[in-house]
Amino acid sequence: MGQNLTQKILTSHLVSGNLAEGNEIALKIDQTLTQDATGTMAYLQFEAMNISRVRTECSVSYIDHNTLQTGFENADDHAFLQSAAARFGAYFSRPGNGICHQVHLERFAKPGKTLLGSDSHTPTAGGMGMLAMGAGGLDVAVAMGGGAFYLPNPKVLRIWLTGQLSDWVSAKDIILEILRVLSVKGGVGKIIEYAGPGVQTLTVPQRATITNMGAELGASSSIFPSDEQTLRFLEAQGRAADFIPLSADQDASYDEEIEIDLSLLAPLVAQPHSPDNVLPVTERSALSVNQVAIGSCTNSSYQDLMSVSQILKGKHVHPDVSLVISPGSRQVLSMLANNGALTDLLDSGARLLEASCGPCIGMGQSPVSKGISVRTFNRNFEGRSGTQDASVFLASPEIAAASALTGYLTDPRTLGLPPVVDFPELFRIDDSMILPPGTADTPIRRGPNIQPLPLAPALANTLSLPIILKLGANVTTDDIMPAGAKILPLRSNIPAISEFTFHKIDAHFASKAKTLKQSIIVAGHNYGQGSSREHAALAPMYLGLRVVLARSFARIHRANLINFGILPITFVNEEDLTRMHAGNILHLVNLHQAILTPAPFAITLNNDSDPVWVKHDLSERQAKILLAGGLLNATKASI
Ligand code: MIC
Ligand code: SF4
């Protein structure tokens, strides 16, 4: 029996575990990426491991999230990261050079390799035939030090693409359709592999839009084969030498399969407040729009922005719409400037932002109160835009540009002939904003915003924990630890950022948690979906959260909880969640024994005689991490 593409890369990188069984596997990581909002922690953690230089083939530290510099904090982080990259042997992509995923695809991603990034959209590089995964900063720090990356052995879901996209239908519509079918939980525990005759009709940037938003499916990764399109992209980036052909064997098998006929797709939107709340744009086309935001790591490639410029050329943005555009990289921006498309955008009334994450992570451009914002981004969680009562619709660049012109949510097919964008023979290549690694004696610059890392206490054997919050399904890490211009600058200062934990759900959470000293959260399915930010584990740990009891967890957040010494457990009988309320006490006894044994165990709710049966699904490695009080403690103890 042949291998699928995922199995091929897993096999060639397997350090321990067995691909035939459903347990944990460990992989060798070839490349890492970090960004500034998670990178300061990752580099502080790397430093704490006392390893002098990175041991990967290539590690890149990007500055793309916090570039507003509203105070000294962001600038402190940038200086720290620049000096840390130089000292520890990583490349440093300077602020202004672009969004990590876009730049990585352009300049570093290689077919057949593994990439681990401290950002949930790292699978973007799967558009290049790379096995790219998001993780918490600490897991990335371990990988930078040459350590393996552990993950539950994934299932492989094949999405067989047939046909060809119709005019005005784009890669964004493909992934929105998949989200409609599978939901934000549909990819959990899976790697999504694309195959079929439709694949060759998609360029690498289109594929990257699809693999990028695989994160919204909860998938561990998404991957396309490496083929003629891959070679074409690499040649145009002056990197033909990085090409290898790679695809699944003809007789490969898959755990699950679905099929999508590209020619049947129509322009789609994801309605507030979830990326899987998808329907055809025609069903919402009467809706007035206040803001259109084009950019983010999903849709800010040269091809995307050229389409937008052609749609806007010679026309003017509707007077009631604010149109903001953030190019994905300096390469994209300079090509638009060079060929005149930037002038078309500016003449239409578009407001140009830096090549960075910007509004996607609430760094400016919050919509008007109760505003409708159409964004080409990947997440529309409530409040993420910075305006709590705004409604964010996710859509293709074509829908976004059309809506900016008309002032209402618009089916681009009403505009007539579609844009025609030639694939560049050669992109503009200028790596001068990527600083090569420096020498090991480079001094680290550490401003007052860089605070030492708090460590978790070892897991106690007996715990009586008050339920501090009872939550529903699909709680996001944006709910747990919001981002935005006010909070993001505090990412390297856990005592300061912890004050904002669950702020939008309960403004008094931090003070309550401090009064209780120790606590537990109970929740529904898919707890911790979304961003990889480990602050959503670190800050609650700092405030005394010891256990989360949920119906199920999102992969990255569950790993982050374990890494920071918080025990994630699930219900044997999901209905038991209905028995619990905030303020109740959960008693856990003989925990050490319980987590070292695979069997379910009983805990007590208040003084109820009827116990609550729970399970932990921890590997032995993870149980030991918890017993040590988190991965950093465990790693230190083993050095
Ligand atoms: C996001 O899109 O939510 C982020 C900001 O890129 C995060 C990382 C972070 O919170 O720093 C992600 O996706 O992992
Ligand atoms: Fe940046 Fe948004 Fe992409 Fe996250 S999803 S990396 S904030 S552009």
Image: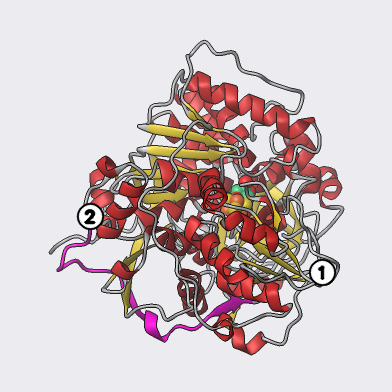
Is residue 590 something that shows in the picture?
no
> In this picture, is 461 found above or below 612?
above
Q: Which quadrant does the C terminus fall into?
A: top left
Hey, what amino acid is under mark 1?
Asp
Q: Position of residue 269 (x, y in %)?
A: 59, 77
Residue 342, visible in the rendered structure: yes
The residue wearing badge 1 is: 389
| Label 1: which secondary element | loop
Left or right: 430, with 2 as reference point: right
Magenta stretch holds residue 253: yes
Q: Residue placed at 32% from the left, 80% from the top?
A: 163
Residue in the foreground of this view, choosing between 583 and 399: 399
Residue situated in front as seen by the camera: 353 or 523:
353
Q: Residues within 10 Å of mark 2 (few under 14, many from 20)?
A: some
For disc 2, the marked residue is: 246
Place of residue 12 in the rendered image (x, y in percent of width and height, measured from the top left): 23, 45
